[in-house]
Amino acid sequence: MNSFGKVKNKQDLRSKPDIKFHRSRLGFLSTCSLINITHHTCRLPVEPGPCNEAHPRWFYDVQTQNCLPFVFGGCGGNKNRFKTSEICLRFCTGITATPPERRPYVFQPATSTPEPTQCPPSNCANLQCPYGIEESFDINGCSSCRCSNPCE
């Protein structure tokens, strides 16, 4: 496998039994490569292109973490361009401006049982994650969630 995650031959496929591979026009790409492509695409700035046509499109804005409309000129631009808001959200939901920092989880037993009103509302129900959700608890027993990343 090369540095971009592209598989050169079938031997590479057999040597990576725990990673799923997908056939694309680029060859076989690992799930991790597709995730990296997705994250990169969703972080690109809006780019209408130099042409003068008027195609309504949607782009993912990492600052607001939402899909916003724009007018695509018909040529140039970049991959952060979707035909519908739904496709944009399905592709990019959860992508942030900078990747979240991975911190090791250290279990510390709670000194007391928290009152339910002490914990802020959990974000778990709001996440839409293609590879599942990781839930963690702080020392007070309050939960928070983030999207699982099979590449880490």
Image (cartoon, grey):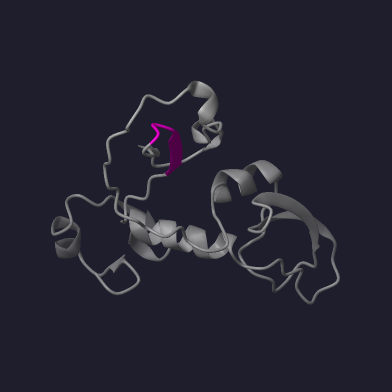
- Can you give x and y, in whole percent of width and height, for residue 82 in the image? 66, 53
Against 49, residue 80 (above or below) is: above
Point 37% across, 61% down: residue:
33
Residue furthest out toward the bottom: 50
Residue 111 is inside the magenta segment: no
Q: Looking at the image, is 133 positioned above or below residue 99?
A: above
Total residue callouts? 0
Confirm whether the magenta stretch covers residue 142: yes
Q: Is residue 58 left or right of residue 107?
A: right
Give the residue drawn at x 35%, y 57%.
Answer: 32
Q: Front-most of 53 and 110?
A: 110
Which image quarter: residue 44? bottom right
For the C terminus, the quadrant is bottom left
In the image, residue 116 sits, relative to residue 86, either above or below, namely above
Q: Position of residue 3 (x, y in %)?
A: 31, 74
Q: Find the magenta span and give its range.
A: 140-146
Question: Residue, x 69% and y 50% (percent of image)?
Answer: 67
Q: Nearer the viewer, residue 45 or 48?
A: 45
Q: Quadrant of residue 16?
A: bottom left
Q: Position of residue 43 (x, y in %)?
A: 58, 64
Q: On the picture, is 38 further left or further right than 46?
A: left
Residue 17, x across and y down, in percent: 16, 51
Residue at 40% of width from left, 34% of height from top? 140
